[in-house]
Amino acid sequence: MRKTVKIVGIEVDKLDFLEAQEKVAEFLEGDSLNMIFTPNSEMLLDAVKDRELENILNEAQLVIPDGIGVVIASKFYGTPLKERVTGVDLSTKILELGAKKNSRLFLLGASEESVTGAAEKIKERFQGIDVVGVRNGYYSEDEEEQIIDEINQSGAEILFVGLGAPRQEKLIYKYKDRLGVKIALGFGGGIDIFSGTVKRAPEFYQKAGLEWFYRFIKQPSRFMRITKLPKFILLAMVDAATSKY
């Protein structure tokens, strides 16, 4: 039975990394589409204002806490999440599991240079994964139908969508009844990380839950986005307190 913690209206799965890994292994054995979303504090704060996004997140088969702020917020509700499970770490595990099954992968998002670079790096690192298609994220809404057809025709079983939130979540949900893949993951900036275009924070920052701070040091222009973290924490505190009555 699925165990979740409802944080500002969004059901987040109460799983540690090993349990999340077991879940995606089940998805790869099945035949139906499983939507995996990886919200951080910023996305959950946006979902409070965007009812469409809230509904999309709550209809996913797996919602993991990508940000440390989400883990902190869960404690206010009396049923804390077990640990932070990042989208990059989980996608790596999906590729490891998929490589053993010779799974087919389609990458959608980022720049042409980044998505093709990610495809090459993935093929080198995860031998057994068949990258059956790539498409950059620079397209118009009129091209969506064609792209979905391309994904289906490729025979992909795994789809990583790196268009940024909430665009990637809304695209996956919009075409959930047409997509023939087993796993569709909202990938955020994961394509850039796999390609090497963007470097992930050093392990110290990852383990301390301070990847957001590392990104801020590297990109001070992210300041306004960083300010959403304390706003989210405050909102969660108030929501948790009022939900008890």
Image: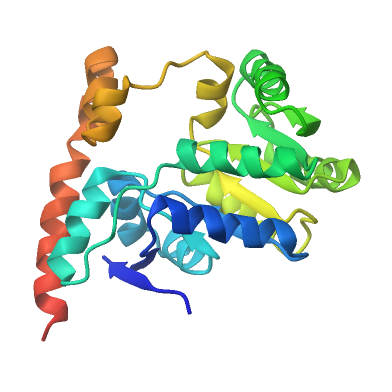
Compared across the picture, whether 240 is left or right of 209 comes to left
Q: Which residue is drawn at 54% across and 51% down?
A: 169
Q: Where is residue 147 in the image (x, y as percent from the top left)?
A: 79, 40
Quarter of the image for residue 218 reads: top left
Q: Which of the image's four quarters has the C terminus?
A: bottom left
Q: Where is residue 133 in the image (x, y as percent from the top left)?
A: 80, 31
150 lies above or below 78: above
145 lies above or below 187: below
Q: Where is residue 172 in the image (x, y as percent from the top left)?
A: 63, 53
Q: Which residue is drawn at 56% across and 53% down?
A: 170
Q: Which of 31 and 241 is in front in this view?
A: 31
Quarter of the image for residue 29 reads: bottom right
Q: Which of 65 and 165 is in front in this view?
A: 65
Quarter of the image for residue 79 reads: bottom left
Compared across the picture, whether 63 is left or right of 68 comes to right
Q: Which residue is drawn at 22% across and 47% down?
A: 69
In this view, which residue lies farthest toward the right? Answer: 153
Q: Is residue 125 visible?
A: yes
Q: Can residue 9 be seen in this view?
A: no
Image coloring type? rainbow
Q: Position of residue 93 (x, y in %)?
A: 56, 41
Q: Nearer the viewer, residue 198 or 137?
A: 198
Tally of marks = 0
In this view, which residue lies farthest toward the bottom? Answer: 245
Q: Residue at x 13, y 44 (%)?
A: 230
Compared across the picture, whether 163 is left or right of 15 comes to right
